[in-house]
Amino acid sequence: MPTAVAEGVFVVRPDGARLIAGRRKQDGEMRFPMPTGPEADLYEPVELAPEGRLWSFTVQRFRPKTPPYVGDDDDRSFKPFAVGYVEFPGQVIVEGRILIDDFGRLRLGQPMRVDLETFPTSTRGQVATYAFRPAS
Amino acid sequence: MTDVHIVGAGIHPFGRHADKTGLDQGVHAVREALTDAGLEWRDMQFAFGGSSAAGSADAALPRLGLTGVQFINISNGCATGGSSLLSGYWAIKSGEFDLGVVLGFDKHPRGAFNADPEASGLPRWYGETGMMLTTQFFAMKIRRYMELHGISATTLGRVAVKAFENGAVTPHAWRRQPVDLETVLASEMLSDPLTKFMFCSPAEGGAALVLASDRKMRELGLSGPRIRGAAVRTRPRGSFEVFAPSLDVQRGKSPTELASKAAYEMAGVGPADVDVAQLQDTESGAEVMHMAENGFCADGEQEQLLVEGATRVTGRLPINTDGGCIACGEPIGASGLRQVFENVQQLRQRAVGRQVEGARIGYSQVYGAPGLSAVAVLEA
C-alpha cells in the first residue's frame, strides 16, 4: 500500500476504508477532512459510514492545471475521471474522486462505497487516496 | 441620507488584448466614464478600485493624476467590482463625500483559473488530486439542480445561444458571433453536463462608474440612474460553494439569496418590478439557478421560460442583455462593474441594438469564489 495522501484523512478497517471527518464540539457541525493545526482542538474525529448515496457528480474531461494538480500524466495521456459528492446520512456530504469506467451509469441517489485508489503523482510517486465506488 | 446616482459610465471592451495591460484597460474605462460625465479626474474626491490578477488598482494614479485623492484598493474575490460599487455608494450615502469613481480591471491567463488550496484554507491534497476546479463545482451544482427541478441540457444550450445573440450586438462584448443550439450542445464536453460553449472564459477588460450625490448631480447639471439598493453577502452555513471538500447535510440558503433579499428590501422593490437583469452566468447553469435565487421565478420554471424566449431582449424578463460573462468573458475585477455599466446603458436608453423598451429598474448580481454575491438595484 503506497503512503496515504495525508495523515488522518481515512483509516483502513478489516472490512474496508473509512473517512475521518471532524465534529465541532460546540455545535456538532461536521466537516471533512478533520481540521488540522490549532483548529483541531475544537473538533473530535468521527469515522463516517462505509456507504452513502451519490448527491451530485460530474466528469473532469480536461487535465486540471498544475499547480495544484500533480497527476503524473500530461494533456495527451490524461484520462477523464468522475468526481462527485456522497451524502453520508446524518453525518456530512463529502467530495471525492469516483471509480467507474462507464460514466453514463452514474445516477443521483445511488449507493456508493468508500474505497482507496492509488494515485500516481509527479511529485511524490504513488499515493493512496480515498475514492467512491458504486456499491454492488 | 442622500441618494446616490451613477452620472458617468465607461468600459474597455472585454476580450483578449495582447498589446494592453489590465491597467491600460482600467485607465481607459475611467477616462471614458469621466468623459461620459463631462468631468475631470481632479474633480474626484474618492476612488475605490480592484483587480484580481492585474496588479494594484491604485497604479492608475500616476496616469490619471496625482491629486492626492483618497484611493482604496478593493479585493473581494469575484465580487470585487460589486464591492467597489458598494464602497463608493456608502462613501456618498454617509455624507462624507459627494463625487467619486469606482473602477475594476483584469487580465487573466487562458483556461481555467489556477487555484491555490492553502490560500483558501484547504489541504494541499484537495488540489493535488484534481478536485479544486471551479468548473467542477458549477457542473455539480447544476447537475443536482437539473435532477431536482427538471431542467434539460437543451435549456442550458438555450441560455448560451441567447448570450451569443446578445453579444453579437454589444460593442463591449468579446464573442460577437451568434452560435446555434446544435453547435452549443455538440461542442466539447468540459465538465458534464456543461460544454465548452456553455462556459465563460477568463478574459480582460475594464469598467468604471462615476458616482455622485443627489445634490452634487444637480449642482453640476448632470443626470443618471439612482442606486436604490446594493448589498454584498457571503456564504451562510449549508450553502453549496466552490472549493468545498464537504457540505453540511442540513442544506441552507445561498449568498445570492441573502444579497438579493437585502438589496430588494433597501430598494423597496421586488423581482416583479425589475425590467432588465444582469445575472452571474459563469456558465449556462449558473444563469438558470440564479434566475430562481434572485426571485425571478420558482425552481424549475426556467425550462418553460427559456422555451418561450422570456429572457431574450424582447422577452418579458430580459437577462444578460450584453451577453453576460458567456459572451463577454470574465475579468474578475471588472465583471461586476460591467453588469452595472450595461444596466446604466439600458436605463439611459442608449443600449443600441439591444435596448429593452422603457426599462426603468435594472438589477445586477455578481457571484463567485469563495462564495459571495453582490447585488445592485438601479432606477432610471
Image: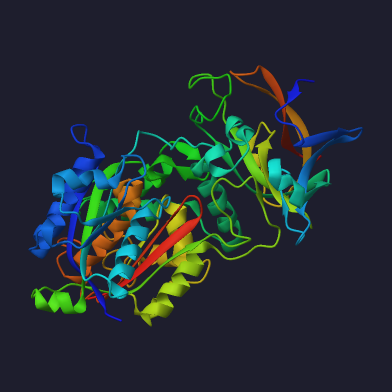
Q: Quadrant of the N terminus of chain A?
A: top right
- Of B69 and A108, nearer the camera is B69
Residue B331 at x, y percent in the picture? 32, 45
- Quadrant of the rendered image containing residue B245: top right
Q: How is the image coloured?
A: rainbow
Q: Quadrant of the C terminus of chain A?
A: top right
Q: Residue placed farthest to the front in the image?
A: B68
Q: Residue at x 14, y 49 (%)?
A: B64
**B264 to B23, vertically: above or below:** below
Residue B171 visible in the displayed image: no
Residue B112 at x, y percent in the picture? 43, 37
Q: Residue at x 51, y 20 (%)?
A: A74
**A97 to B340, vertically: above or below:** above
Residue A89 at x, y percent in the picture? 78, 55
Q: Residue at x 21, y 46 (%)?
A: B60
Q: How many marks?
A: 0
Residue B256 visible in the displayed image: yes
**B183 to A78, vertically: above or below:** below
Q: Residue placed farthest to the right in the image?
A: A14
- Quadrant of the rendered image containing residue B25: top left
**B119 to A24, vertically: above or below:** above
- Of B210 and B98, nearer the camera is B98
Residue B36 at x, y percent in the picture? 11, 61
- Of B358 and B107, nearer the camera is B107
Q: Residue at x 50, y 27 (%)?
A: A66
